[in-house]
Amino acid sequence: MFELKPWDAEAYRRQTRRSTFIVAVTFLALAMLLSSLAVMLFGTPGGDNFRFNLGGVFAAVLMMVALMRLYFWSQPWMAAAVYGWRLKRSLMSITNVMHQVTAGVQAQDPAAMKLLRFYHLGLTQMHQLDANSSAQGSLSRDADEHLARMQALNLDTDQPCLDPTWIETVKRAYSER
């Protein structure tokens, strides 16, 4: 279950820039080190060592995947990037079933209504964190209209958590329509 958490947008961007820099520098260092090592061990002096350089870069990619999953992901300096990634994954899981969510909202299905509310709240936060004010304007009107519909139905409008069962419920209920 993913939960929206308050983030200062400027601090978020500062932290994600820092983590991106650390990951990029680590990758570059690994790629250069492994490429040089491969050429030194297997290459020929003055010969075509492209495949060994490429192999070193490929090995660096594999090592970075392992480092990201096993070490970097849990580091405090990666918290903002991990949160942003999880937020975008959560929003994408709803986007992938948006036609079913829309059908559910039209049918006033509570799970679909909650999903769309979380989607609006999450998208608003994502736009704020990414400093994307141009996309915020069009979303605001739709979110306000949906909020009013939820209030008219006496549904809880505070939806800071995405419950994966809502997605499955909506997919099952509106997939054949």
Image (tube, grey):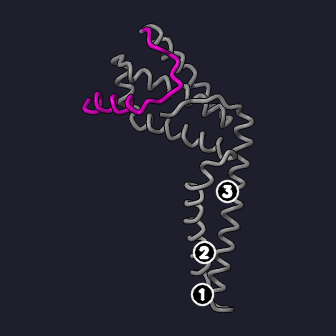
Q: Residue at x 29, y 29 (%)?
A: 174
Provide the residue designation for mark 2. Answer: 56
Q: Nearer the viewer, residue 72 or 8?
A: 72
> Does residue 56 sit above or below 165 in this rendering?
below
Provide the residue designation for mark 1. Answer: 42
Picture coordinates of residue 101 (x, y %)? 38, 27
Disc 3 crowd, CA 10 A, few/some/many (<14, 14-19, 20+):
some
Q: Amino acid at mark 2?
A: Gly
Q: Residue furthest left?
A: 176
Instruction: Give the mark nearer the N terminus: 2 vs 1.
Output: 1
Q: Residue 148, labelled with which disc?
A: none
Picture coordinates of residue 45 (x, y %)? 68, 92
Q: CA distance from mark 2 to mark 1?
A: 11 Å
Q: CA distance from mark 3 to mark 1?
A: 28 Å
Q: Residue at x 65, y 28 (%)?
A: 6
- The picture quadrant where one finds residue 100 is top left
Local SS, label 2: helix
Give the magenta part as a residue range.
154-177
Local SS, label 3: helix
Disc 1 crowd, CA 10 A, few/some/many (<14, 14-19, 20+):
few
As for residue 157 lying within the magenta part, the answer is yes
Provide the residue designation for mark 3. Answer: 23
- The picture quadrant where one finds residue 137 is top right
Picture coordinates of residue 18 (x, y %)? 73, 49
Instruction: Give the mark nearer the N terminus: 2 vs 3.
Output: 3
Q: CA distance from mark 2 to mark 3?
A: 17 Å
Q: Residue at x 53, y 25 (%)?
A: 160
> Does residue 29 sit above or below 173 in this rendering?
below
Q: Nearer the viewer, residue 46 or 73?
A: 73
Local SS, label 1: helix
Q: Amino acid at mark 3?
A: Val
